[in-house]
Amino acid sequence: MTGFFHFLLTYFTTGSSPAWQRLPLHDLPKPAASLDVRTLSQKPRIYLVDGLLTDGECAALIDMAAPRLMEEEADNVIGNESRYFMYFTAEEEEQLPLLQHITKRLHRLARIPDRFGEGLIVEKIHGSRTGPITFYNESDPYEEEPRIASITVFLNGPSTPYDGGDMLFPMGSLQRCSAGEARCCDPYLSSNFDGPLRIPRERGRAILLYNTNLDGTQANGVEVGDCPLTRPDVERWLVRRYFRAGPYYNVLGPQDPRHDGLPLPPHSTAHASSHGDWRLADNFLTPEECRHLIGLAEHNLTLGRIGGMGGGGIADDDIRSSWQFYTHPNASQTDPILRRVLKRFQRAARIPDKFGETLQIGRYTEGQKYEIHHDSTPGRGTAMWRPATIITYLSDVEEGGHTIFIPFNDERCRPLSNCCQQEDMPGTIRVPPKLGRAVLFYSYDLEGKHDPASRHAACPVLKGTKWIAQRWFQGLDFEDRVHELDPE
């Protein structure tokens, strides 16, 4: 253990730090599922979360980083601006509780496994400058494990609107913003979705940027720059996490049931996300919202079908014996409850509205099931290319009706009753239906490759009735649909 790391570990576990005293170890942050994630851009995918870090966490990170900052050489700087940075080591991220909590939250927000992160970096800019804004692309698609996403969190805010230090995405105005023609950093010019996107600096505010499209290819328009600070006495602090397409720093923090989603498979010590990418959230929908969705469907149900979307495909009772209803593609324009629900689905999946299929509402009565299947299968055309699925349960079920995830090529679950009747089948994950509960899972990995671990089934209902609502997200957008963006 290095001398400085030993100092940090002692410093942040003895309670001697004022910043740490404002963040007791037992005062854990709220789970990622409850964060208010706002969509700022759909192409590229940019999201904003206010209050991701608390004031105490921001102050503690500044305290930890300040004595270790190294100065960075900056190009094309006119004025008195200085830039500094430092990285936390893998050992620190593994053993310091503060860093464990923060990095866990960042990874759950990005929906990216713990091991895929680069070292947590703290940056400081001091002083003012003039001249053109420098924009940079954080990802090199030719690297073996390219950067696919990043989260930046401001650790301090401005004292006046004129202080600067905002984050700027040119969004098609790269040349104009670089040349200083568009006044892109003017705080009194409102950011909008048709031009430069300026994100004001606020303490604890996080910006999540995906550098890739849903198929793993490089996204356009991901260049980002910093608005200059306007006075020589101003400082801007931030913390940033870059995420790779594969294991990089290889730090796996301790499990946190509020962030890690589904429980482990029975008799398995492996982390659930190493065998597929799933998330679970209770109380995702309110009882009122569940009743409303059931009311939309209960008098309009048709026999469940397979192999299509929006009610297409074929009916086969041996595979799927439930009933279903699809909402109209633009029904949310006149139904505020449905609009609120769909927006929550989109935020949870971190996928833009335009990629979402119409909402399907389903009913399973006693004996009804859905056999083992994939929601998305390569080679079946774009109509069945579904990177992500969210299933929500609109009712409690007296007995049965579990959703079960089954390892690829595992034939122990044929017939399905073998796994549905045995609660401790090794390697499987069972999700009991519960009113308001949601399960999110991805059918493709971060590079757009099909994930066979997304195979699942709906166990037969043994007693009662199961209502669900599910939304699939496509790899291609539906340009003919009307989708409301989040307010600025």
Image (cartoon, grey):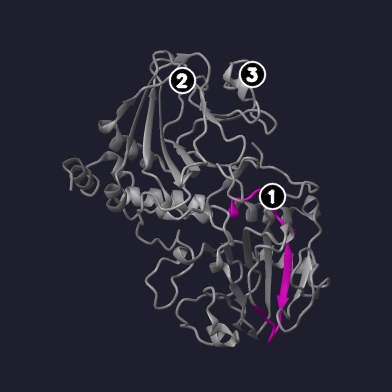
Residue nearest the viewer, comparing 385 with 44 = 385
| Mark identifier at residue 297 | none
Residue nearest the viewer, comparing 176 with 140 = 140
The answer to which quarter of the image holds residue 361 is bottom right
Task: Quickly name the residue at label 3.
Answer: 182
Q: Nearer the viewer, mark 1 or mark 2?
A: 1
Residue nearest the viewer, comparing 271 with 433 = 271
Seen at 76% across and 64% down, the residue is: 309
Residue 123 horizontal side relative to residue 354, left or right: left
52 over 289 or under it: above or below:
above
Residue 86 horizontal side relative to residue 137, left or right: left
Task: Quickly name the residue at label 2.
Answer: 229
What quarter of the picture does the C terminus occupy? top right
- Circle 1/circle 2 CB separation < 8 Å: no
State the separation of the CA atoms marked 1 and 2.
35 Å
Number of other residues with Cα within 10 Å of mark 3, as a class: few under 14, some 14 to 19, many 20 or more: some
Residue 369 lies in the magenta stretch: yes
Residue 22 horizontal side relative to residue 31, left or right: left
State the separation of the CA atoms marked 1 and 3.
29 Å
Task: Quickly name the residue at label 1.
Answer: 353
Give the secondary structure at mark 1. Answer: helix
Give the secondary structure at mark 3. Answer: loop
> Can residue 29 be seen at all in this image of the molecule?
no
Q: Earlier in the sequence, mark 1 or mark 3?
A: 3
Which stretch is magenta?
Answer: 348-371
State the separation of the CA atoms marked 3 and 2.
18 Å
Give the secondary structure at mark 2. Answer: loop
Q: Earlier in the sequence, mark 1 or mark 2?
A: 2
Q: Disc 1 residue type?
A: Asp
Q: Disc 2 residue type?
A: Leu
Residue 80 lies in the magenta stretch: no
Seen at 45% across and 74% down, the residue is: 265
